[in-house]
Amino acid sequence: MMFIWILAIGGIIWYLGITDSSSKRNNGYRSSHAKEILDQRFAQGELNESTYLKMKRQLEEET
């Protein structure tokens, strides 16, 4: 009986470890994609320099 509880708790810890690491990888992808969009908007003249720098800082703080 004790073995089943240890196995169940270990499985939960393992599952949480996997989901946490995959969400960190996805967050890195979204952040880099958002930076690319921001760079494009600045290059096309949609954003002025101060807005661009402010938004860039915000993105860097999130990662």
Image (cartoon, rainbow, N blue to C red):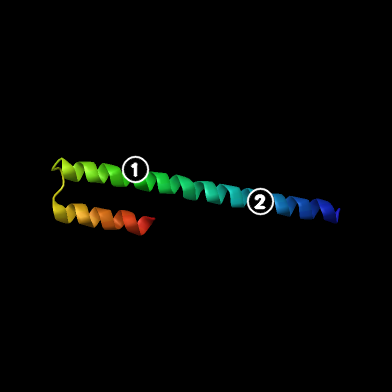
- Secondary element at tag 1: helix
Residue type of the residue flagged with mark 1: His
Please, which residue is most extreme toward the right here? 1
Quadrant position of the C terminus in the picture = bottom left
Q: Give the vertical position of 36 relative to 50 (above or below).
A: above
Residue type of the residue flagged with mark 2: Trp
Disc 1: CA contacts within 10 A as few (<14), some (14-19) or many (>=20) = few
Question: Where does the image place residue 30, in percent across and percent down from the top left?
Answer: 38, 44
Question: Marks 1/2: CA distance?
Answer: 29 Å
Q: Which residue is mark 2?
A: 14
Question: Where does the image place residue 53, in percent across and percent down from the top left?
Answer: 21, 56
Q: Nearer the viewer, residue 5 or 22?
A: 22
Question: Where does the image place residue 40, in percent across and percent down from the top left?
Answer: 22, 41
Question: Where does the image place residue 23, in percent across and percent down from the top left?
Answer: 50, 47
Name the mark nearer the viewer: 1 or 2.
Answer: 1
Q: Is residue 32 left or right of residue 23?
A: left
Give me the residue at 81% from left, 51% from top.
4
Give me the residue at 79% from left, 54% from top.
5
Give me the residue at 20% from left, 42% from top.
41
Q: Give the vertical position of 34 relative to 51 (above or below).
A: above
Q: Which residue is mark 1?
A: 33
Give me the residue at 34% from left, 59% from top.
61
| Sequence-first disc among 1 and 2 | 2
